[in-house]
Structures are given as C-alpha cells and as structure tokens.
Amino acid sequence: MLTFRDITMADHDLILPMVQDFYQGDAVLHPVDPEILERSFRDAADPQEPLLRGLLIEMDGQPAGYLYISQCYSAEVGGRCIFLEEIYLAPAFRGRGLGGEILAWIERQYPTARRFRLEVNDINQNAIRLYQKAGYQYLRYEQMVIDKIK
C-alpha cells in the first residue's frame, strides 16, 4: 500500500541520497550545488516553512521515494498553484503504476488548487507519458531566471 508522510530532519540520510540520484538523472539538465540540495532538504523538513513541503513515499512500509511540493498564487488562473518541484521514485519502484497514484494523491491533498504545475524535459519520455496520462498538458513558456544565491 502506498503511503505518504511529511519528512523530518531525522530523514536526512534517507532522503538526501534520493535527492542526489534525482539530480543526476534525466529530470535535471544542469548541475546543482550540493549546498543548495542540503538547504532545500532542511526547508522541506521544516514545518515552519510555508512554501515547501517534503514528503516520504512508502510502499508497504518501505521507502520508495520522495516529493517536494511548493505553493504560490497564480494570477494566470486566479488562485493557488501547486508546483510539483520534485517527484522521485527509487528504481525498484518504477514501472509499477505508482506514478499515477502519487499524482492523484497530490490532487486530493490540495482540493482548492486551480493549477498543478511541473517541469519536464524531452529526454524524460517515461515521465512525459505518465503526466499526459494523468491529464497534464504542455504550457509553453521559455523561462528566464536570475539567481540571487549568497
């Protein structure tokens, strides 16, 4: 059975290897400083951080993956937007239909959200198929960023 629970600081040694695997896989096209991954984990595990939530995914009591979810207001849809920052399943749990269950669970957790948003790149075709099957569509924008990291 698939279950979810909020991560805590005690999950550091369980979650961080999965985060590192996520950032070395097809989901991410550029390197990210390990210090940023540490800071993001701390924020995701902090119940006082209102914008980022980290969850451990378990299958039959075994760690299967993790989620990072953030929230914002989207003027484009006139309401809350849930950004699926990171969805990670360990290789042993992939290809078992869990992705669709995870996406459905997230939508149930945020019933007032007007939009669910995620990023995907063309190299990650398995993820694209999963998201399209769940009803996600491409929203074409080019992103521009300026990082103010100190």
Image (spheres, rainbow, N blue to C red):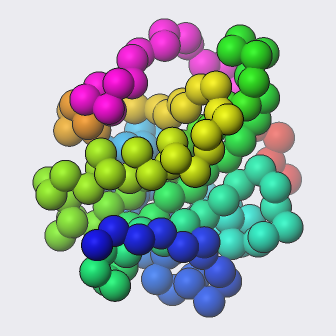
User: Residue at coordinates 37% horizontally, 75% vertically from top-left?
Assistant: 58
Residue at the far left: name it. Answer: 95
In the image, taking residue 73 as reference, residue 68 lies left or right, namely: left
Q: In which quarter of the image is the N terminus?
A: bottom left
Q: In this view, does 18 lie to the left or right of 51?
A: left
What is the magenta range? 131-145
Percent position of residue 129, x then y: 22, 31
> Where in the figure is residue 131, as x and y percent of width and height?
32, 32
Instruction: Determine whether 89 is above or below 83 in the image.
Output: below
| Horizontal arrangement in the rendering, residue 111 relative to residue 22 (left or right) | right
**Residue 146 in sight here:** no
Looking at the picture, tell me which residue is in the foreground, 90 or 74.
74
Magenta-span inclusion, residue 135: yes
Does 110 appear in magenta? no
Residue drawn at the location 58% of the way across and 51% of the way down: 109
**85 to 130, vertically: above or below:** below
Can the viewer see residue 84? Answer: yes
Q: Is the magenta stretch mostly helix, strand or loop?
A: loop
Name which quarter of the figure residue 137 lies in: top left
